[in-house]
Amino acid sequence: MRARDSARLSAIRLILAAVKQREVDERIELADPDVVSVIEKMLKQRRESIVQFEKAARHDLAQAEKFEVEVLSAYLPQQLGEAEIEKEIAAAIAAAGASGIKDMGKVMAALKPRLAGKADMAKVSGQVKSKLSG
């Protein structure tokens, strides 16, 4: 607020509003993992909006959404590198005894708690699918 960065302040207020809304809806106080899931949901919505805005040639709105993605990303835990994600995927496949694409649900169920907030789960899902089908 003191820096008079109204765009950043607006994005932070969106995070606070989303967290408060979920607390009121569920009548609970959110713990850190729950707040991370709220932020991840907001990021997913922003990324989908960016795609739609760019399809409609609304680059001004897409830029605003990209800025919000940057602000939201700053409040997530440090993202894992590709090598660490590959290691987690390999461990989950081995632990689940997965042999084909039909076992993808088991593998993703094992990965979600370990990678939530630390990796883009859509990308992880794609990597798991390619490993199990290939």
Image (cartoon, rainbow, N blue to C red):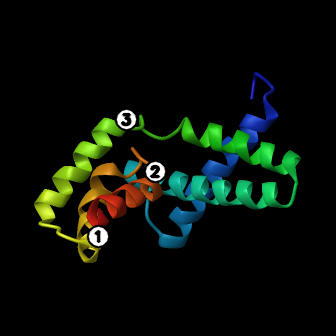
Residue 60 in the image: x percent, y percent? 87, 46
> Pointers 3 and 1 in contact (CB under 8 A)?
no
> Pointers 3 and 2 in contact (CB under 8 A)?
no
From what the image shows, is residue 70 above or below residue 13? above
Identify the residue at image location x=76%, y=61%. 52
Element under disc 3:
loop
Marks 3 and 1 sit apart, C-alpha to C-alpha, by 22 Å
Element under disc 2:
loop
Marks 3 and 2 sit apart, C-alpha to C-alpha, by 11 Å
Q: Tell me where residue 63 sits by quadrant.
A: top right
Which residue position is annotated with label 2? 120
> Most extreme residue toward the front, as rendered?
134
Q: What label does residue 81 carry, if any?
A: 3
Q: From this viewpoint, is residue 100 visible? A: yes
Comparing 47 with 56, the one in front is 56
Residue 108 in the image: x percent, y percent? 30, 64
> Most extreme residue toward the bottom, as rendered?
102
Residue 126 in the image: x percent, y percent? 41, 59
Earlier residue among tags 3 and 2 = 3
Q: Tell me where residue 110 sits by quadrant.
A: bottom left
Q: From this viewpoint, is residue 31 visible? A: no
Identify the residue at image location x=55%, y=67%. 24
Amino acid bearing label 3: Gly
Crowd class of label 3 (few under 14; some 14 to 19; many from 20; radius 10 Å): few
Which residue position is annotated with label 1? 104
Q: Quadrant of the N terminus?
A: top right
Amino acid bearing label 1: Met
